[in-house]
Amino acid sequence: MNDEFYEPVFDLSKLQDRGNKKWVAMMLPEHVSLLREYGKEIKREPIPELDEWDYDAIQHTLDMAIKSKADTKVKLWRDGAFFYNRGIVESVDLRRRVIELEDPFSLLQLKLDEIVDVTIID
C-alpha cells in the first residue's frame, strides 16, 4: 500500500440544502408569522429626510414641467416603499395638496406629501 496520505474529495456542488424547510417543522405558526413580518419590515425603506433645498428643487421642477408640458417622472414614498409614476403634470392644487399627472391611461392625483423627487425626462 502507498504511504501517502489519502484525502477523500467531496463534491459540494451536489449538496442540496433544504433551506428553511427543515426548521419550519419545529416552529410554531406564531413564530413563522413573526418571521415573515420581520422579513417585510427589513425590506421597508426609511422615509427620506428632505430639507428646504430639496423642497425648493421639487417646486422648481414642477413649475418647469407644468409650463413646458414635458414628460415627467415623479418618485413617491408610501408605506416604506418607493413608487414611480410617469406622465405630464397638468396642475398643482395647493389647497388639496395634490398634483394631477396625466399618464397614457388615466389622470392620477398624487399627494404632495408623498413626493420625494421630480425629474423632467428629455
Image (spheres, helix red, strand yellow):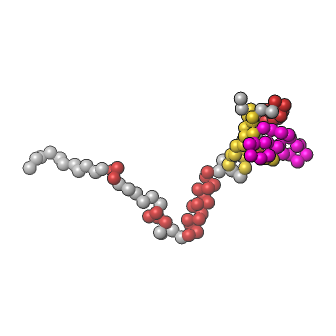
Q: Residue furthest left?
A: 1
Q: Quadrant of the C terminus?
A: top right
List x then y, in percent, for residue 112. 81, 44
Instruction: Look at the image and tell me whether residue 103 can be seen.
Output: yes
List x then y, in percent, for residue 75. 72, 41
Asked whether, in this view, residue 12 is left or right of residue 43, the answer is: left
Residue at image x 60%, y 58%?
Answer: 38
Q: Choose between 69 and 120: the one closer to the eye.
A: 69
Task: Classify 52 as above or below 7.
Answer: above
Residue at image x 69%, y 50%?
Answer: 80
Residue at image x 22%, y 49%?
Answer: 7
List x then y, in percent, for residue 85. 72, 43
* 22 drawn magenta: no
Task: Classify 82 as above or below 28.
Answer: above
Asked whether, in this view, residue 28 is left or right of residue 104, the answer is: left
Tell how many labels. 0
Q: Choose between 114 and 23: the one closer to the eye.
A: 114
Task: Classify 26 as above or below 17.
Answer: below
* 101 drawn magenta: yes
Q: Residue furthest right?
A: 95
**Magenta segment:** 88-107
Magenta-colored segment: predominant secondary structure: strand
Q: Choose between 50 and 3: the one closer to the eye.
A: 50
Instruction: Look at the image and tell me whether residue 112 can be seen.
Output: no
Asked whether, in this view, residue 46 is left or right of residue 18, the answer is: right
Residue at image x 79%, y 42%?
Answer: 101
